[in-house]
Amino acid sequence: MLVSLLKRFGVKLSLNDPRWGKNPEGDHKAQEGRRPGEGPPDLDQMWRDFNARLNRLFGNRGNNGGGDSGGPYRGEGRGAGITASVIGFIVLLIWLASGAFIVQEGQVGVVTTFGRLSHTTGAGFNWRWPAPIQAHETVNVSQVRTAEVGYRDNVRNKQGAESLMLTDDENIIDIQFAVQYTLKDPVAWVFNNRDQDTTVHQVAETAIREVVGKSKMDFVLYEGREKVALDVHNMIQQIIDRYKLGALITNVTMQNVQPPEQVQSAFDDAVKAGQDRARARNEGEAYANDVIPRARGAAFRLLQDAEAYRSMVVENATGNASRFNQVVTEYAKAPGVTRDRMYIDTMQQIFSSTSKVMVDAKSGSNLLYLPLDKLIAQVAANDAATGSARSGPVQAPQDQGSTPTQEVMQTIEQVRQRDSRARDSSRDRESR
């Protein structure tokens, strides 16, 4: 900028200028014998030329016709003052321009005056008084920051001093987790604490050690992971609010929870034994759930059948007693008719379940043919169906023309005895 201004005033700073180092108003004889490029440039002469041009530019041309009145030193002093003013003005513009700054979207600018909070700015072009009066700091409030406890960048890169913790049942456990947070108050984040990221990291480690120290090892390893993460989240937020750090915890992620590597194999065996025990218990419960309902159903069915049988027997007995009472009443009114009716009903019941042979007594023939084989087969079928205990199974002869065996004769005798008993009972009823 200074070079362009000098060019505007007509000052040439080129080494190839023929008048470089020459005095245009005095001592021409000393410069006539010197060729361009033979010696170094005369800086004093250049300064005098520059001041002379500034004098002519700002209206000092009238002094040429009125005498020197002070000589060249007065012109040189005035030109030096003007030059200093121009340079100072340019420096002032540059200094004022250094106070401009741009805040990106999702960021907040915090402006301080002599180290004290002045105001905050939003996204866009902003201006403040340049240093050392004011200064600014840009804070990213939309960025999700992460604090890693127990590892760095990768779960395999463990930090034993942070990850090993003592549980309530005096067991050591290895935990790696990550805490994600954003900024809700950029002013508090900048002014209230130093080294804010380290503070969040230490607060997270403190919270996880307190929660794990109050929990059992099995609870932390298995069913209590989500509960532990939730308790750690709440405790970290409480401590950060107490410190007025200006951060908001968004998520706590349990990356890895396991026993120390030195006892990992023994712990795996214990876990497998526990799984086998749980599997055996589940199988037993499944078997019990299958057998017990069926046994209860069978018992209930037996109770229902017994109840039904009892009701049937009671009802039949009640019905028989009622029928007997009715028969007695009718018998008292007409004994002969009632007796004949009872005899007919009894004979009908007997004949309906026995084998019958019709004999024509009027034909006068003394030769009777009885189909004994068919009678024997029919009696055996009836006995097997009714489950009679008195008559055993009787096998019919394979040949119709063969002689009846002893079993056939026994069957015939049983039929005769049954018929005789029926006749005796009928005679008894008639005698009554």
Image (tube, rainbow, N blue to C red):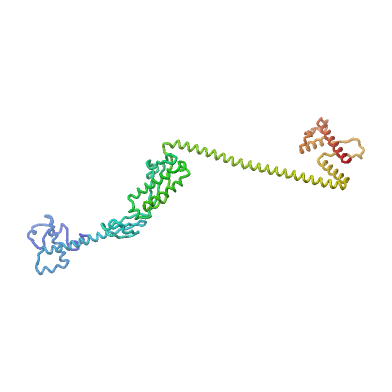
The residue lying at 32 percent from left, 50 percent from top is: 194
Choose top left, top right, bottom left or bottom right for residue 59. bottom left
Q: Is residue 432 left or right of residue 391?
A: right
Q: Nearer the viewer, residue 233 or 142?
A: 233
Asked if residue 18 can be seen in this view, the reply is no
Question: Residue 135 versus residue 42: which sits nearer the camera?
Answer: 135
Q: Residue 405's quadrant in the figure?
A: top right
Quadrant of the image containing the N terminus: bottom left
Query: Looking at the image, which residue is at 76% across and 37% down?
Result: 387
Q: In this rendering, is residue 323 above or below 265?
A: below
35 versus 368 height, above or below: below
Residue most toward the right?
Answer: 364
Which of the pair 323/76 is nearer the observer?
323
Q: Residue furthest left?
A: 29
99 vs 310, nearest the viewer:
310
x, y percentage for residue 60?
14, 67
Q: Position of residue 196 (x, y in %)?
A: 34, 50
At 9% across and 67% down in the image, what residue appears?
Answer: 69
Whether residue 367 is visible, yes or no, is: yes
- Which quarter of the rendering shows the C terminus? top right
- Left or right: 19 as drawn, with respect to 235: left
- Residue 190, image x, y percentages: 33, 53
Residue 12 vertical position relative to residue 326 in the rendered view, above or below = below
Q: Position of residue 351 (x, y in %)?
A: 83, 41
Q: How many marks?
A: 0
Which residue is painted at 10% across and 69% down in the image?
66
